[in-house]
Image (tube, rainbow, N blue to C red):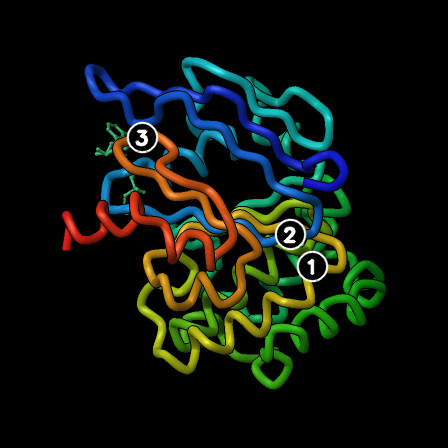
Amino acid sequence: MSGDPILSLRGVGKRFGPLRALDGVDLDVAPRSFHGLIGPNGSGKSTLLRAIAGEHLPDEGSVSFAGEDITTAQPARRARAGLSIKFQITAVLKSLTVYDNLLLALQAAGAPGLGALLLSRTRRSLHEAVMEQLAAFRLAEHADTVAANLSHGQQQWLEIAMALAARPRLLLLDEPTGGMSPEERRATGELLQPIREHCALVIVEHDLDFIKEFCDRLTVLDGGKVLDEGTPAEIEGSEKVQAVYTRRA
Ligand SMILES: Nc1ncnc2c1ncn2[C@@H]1O[C@H](COP(=O)(O)OP(=O)(O)OP(=O)(O)O)[C@@H](O)[C@H]1O
């Protein structure tokens, strides 16, 4: 990898009782690169993402982000350092409009306390940023739509737009295309491309065709260990990986 990685994991382990969900995982993610985590069900992908996010602290090993050791840092400190997460569990407030959801995310990113929402001056000063971000995720024409009335795919895009509100240097996505139509899935790949200008991405996905199209590198987990790592072409040609997927198919 040329230059220092933005994210670096060494020997990360996580147990749940007797189960070793992660076992000696190493991972390096270059700045502004897209890195996919793949592997069979139960191989540890979500647990690894949660260890990076700070939702589960690892029992062993280290996690460093932008040169800072964040192995045991609270999620808020990770966010301040420039790490943002969108998980499968929705963060969208469904009774609010699309516009107000994104406004809240921008205010939470820039100003402490939600009371600022009541200040119309704050709303005005953020209007351009809200509309720009909505346009980037094909949601501008739905600004006044109540979030509950969006399609499933549009709700996912709104969540991603919200997770990007703080201009993070690394975004973590856990199966963002789950439940999407093929067209929404393709569009998601396109909508994520421009974030490369300022942000790296670590993404968990089951859809191999989707992930190999737009990730620079892939890490394959199996039984909590790294089975292989490489470019999508290298992983596609990996006999170890093929053996695991054939075994589970
Ligand atoms: N909070 C928890 N408590 C106990 N066991 C857990 C917990 N979270 C995950 N596990 C177990 O750890 C292992 C790895 O789970 P994880 O969800 O990380 O896998 P995954 O690769 O993301 O799977 P999937 O593709 O099905 O989402 C599984 O055996 C799972 O049952």
Q: Amino acid at mark 1?
A: Arg
Label 2 CB sits under 8 Å from any ligand 1 atom: no
Please name the residue that numbered disc 1 is placed on: 196
Residue depicted at x 75% and y 54% = 198
Q: Earlier in the sequence, mark 1 or mark 3?
A: 1
- Identify the image quadrant of the N terminus: top right
Classify 10 Å Cα crowding around label 3: few (below 14), some (14-19), many (20 and above). many
Residue depicted at x 58% and y 54% = 34
x and y, in percent, of residue 114 in the image: 66, 47
Classify 10 Å Cα crowding around label 2: few (below 14), some (14-19), many (20 and above). many
The span from disc 2 to disc 1 (Cα, nearest Å) is 7 Å
x and y, in percent, of residue 194 in the image: 69, 67
Q: Taking the image as drawn, is residue 148 in sight?
A: yes
Q: Amino acid at mark 2?
A: Ser
x and y, in percent, of residue 121 in the image: 84, 62
- Say what secondary structure mark 1 lies in: helix
Please name the residue that numbered disc 3 is placed on: 224
Please name the residue that numbered disc 2 is placed on: 33
Vertical placement of residue 9 versus 114, above or below: above
The span from disc 3 to disc 2 (Cα, nearest Å) is 23 Å
- Identify the image quadrant of the C terminus: bottom left
Residue depicted at x 22% and y 21% = 19
Label 3 CB sits under 8 Å from any ligand 1 atom: yes
Classify 10 Å Cα crowding around label 1: few (below 14), some (14-19), many (20 and above). some
Q: Taking the image as drawn, is residue 86 in sight?
A: no
- Say what secondary structure mark 2 lies in: loop
